[in-house]
Image (spheres, grey):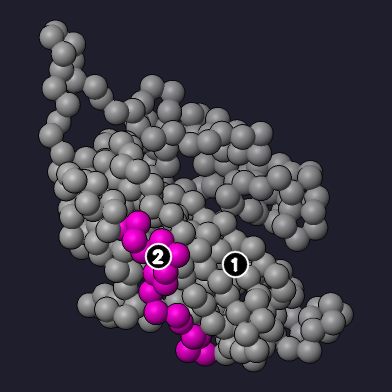
Amino acid sequence: MTEQNDLLARARAYVGSDATKPAVARDPVNQPMIRRWAEAMGDANPLWHDAEARKAAGFAGAVSPPAMLEVWTMAPYRPGGRTEDEGMAVLQLFDDAGYFGVVATNIEQEYIRYLEEGDIIHSRAIVADISDEKRTGLGIGHFVTINYEFTDQKGEPVGRMKFRVLKFKPTLQQPEAKPEGDKPAKKFPHPRPSITHDNAFFWEGLKQRKLLIQSFNGRLVHPPVPACPETGSFDWTTVEACGRGTIHSFVVMHQPQLPGFEYPLPVVLVELEEGVRIVANMVGAKPEDVEIGKAVTLEFVEVEPDYVLPAFRLV
């Protein structure tokens, strides 16, 4: 049995077993956490904020946004990382074999009922599938699928989640492809967005060096949506952003390393003066210079002919 086959056999031995120790929410469903999550996500649905709206919908107390399903049982943040009980042995197996890159590839959630104030959520994660070795743009790796079951304090199901990650050997850790004869080595194209009927105006605006924000009768929304999240209206216009804002939050990307980017890469969530937030890369800034609250100004970066992205520079 080859080393690769042995790794795959050991990984697939986990299929059907718990990926990690079953978790119990540290706090019952509560209004303060709901409020902070909704504010961070820009979710203004009155059901999460307004007691009268909840009462009219037949709820006696706070109601959790369905997308918070996984939040209640998440492991606490620790500077040193998760404890052994909170980690996933099947993922550690790939780490030890050199597949230390990780990226979430897709997630599916099913909501059985609203979570209400006082509910204590339990979760169980089960290894569902380990793929054969795949060659991807990020590197050689395996897709690991985890199925989550969420229950309440009575043991009744409240939701399910399928979560898939790619554990890979980063491209930079692999031998570069050698050119064949006189052919130049293959160059990876810059990642492109998925352009739809709803967001085409945004990308066309960038080509014209304009940052256009969707406006539903004065209510600004970003990213673009098919209809107003508050009124359901399909009628909208655009407003050109002035390009000034402040850093609301940020991360510094180290992995996974995609071709076409320089690492470490600061990625910021900028609150524009118009009141909406946008995610973009920083330019001309060292990671240690990026801080929450710092003023930034918009720049347009033409990464390829006719392909322009917004970016921000410290003022």
Task: Give residue 237's position: percent from left, percent from top.
Answer: 71, 42
- Kindly check if marks 1 and 2 are in contact, taking CB atoms under 8 A apart as contact: no
Q: Quadrant of residue 62?
A: bottom right
Look at label 1 and name its amino acid: Arg
Task: Give residue 143's position: percent from left, percent from top.
Answer: 38, 49
Q: Is residue 15 magenta?
A: yes
Residue 295 as seen in the image, left or right of residue 70: left
Q: Which residue is mark 2?
A: 249
Task: Return the residue nearer the eye: 51 or 123.
Answer: 123
Residue 13 as seen in the image, left or right of residue 1: right
Q: Quadrant of the C terminus?
A: bottom left
Residue at 53 percent across and 59 percent down: it is 162
Residue 111 as seen in the image, left or right of residue 165: right
N-terminal of the pair, mark 1 or mark 2, is 1
Element assignment for label 2: strand
User: Is residue 207 positioned above or below 122 on the image?
Assistant: above
Q: Which mark is residue 42?
A: none
Q: Quadrant of residue 97?
A: bottom left
Q: Is residue 210 magenta?
A: no
Q: Residue furthest top?
A: 182
User: Is residue 253 positioned above or below 150 on the image?
Assistant: above
The local crowd at label 1, few if under 14, some if 14 to 19, many if 20 or more residues have their Cα within 10 Å, is many
The local crowd at label 2, few if under 14, some if 14 to 19, many if 20 or more residues have their Cα within 10 Å, is some
Q: CA distance from mark 1 to mark 2?
A: 30 Å
Look at label 2 and name its amino acid: Ser
Task: Give residue 38's position: percent from left, percent from top.
Answer: 59, 72
Tell me where the magenta segment starts and ends, as one range: 11-27
Q: Which residue is mark 1?
A: 160
Q: Quadrant of residue 32?
A: bottom right
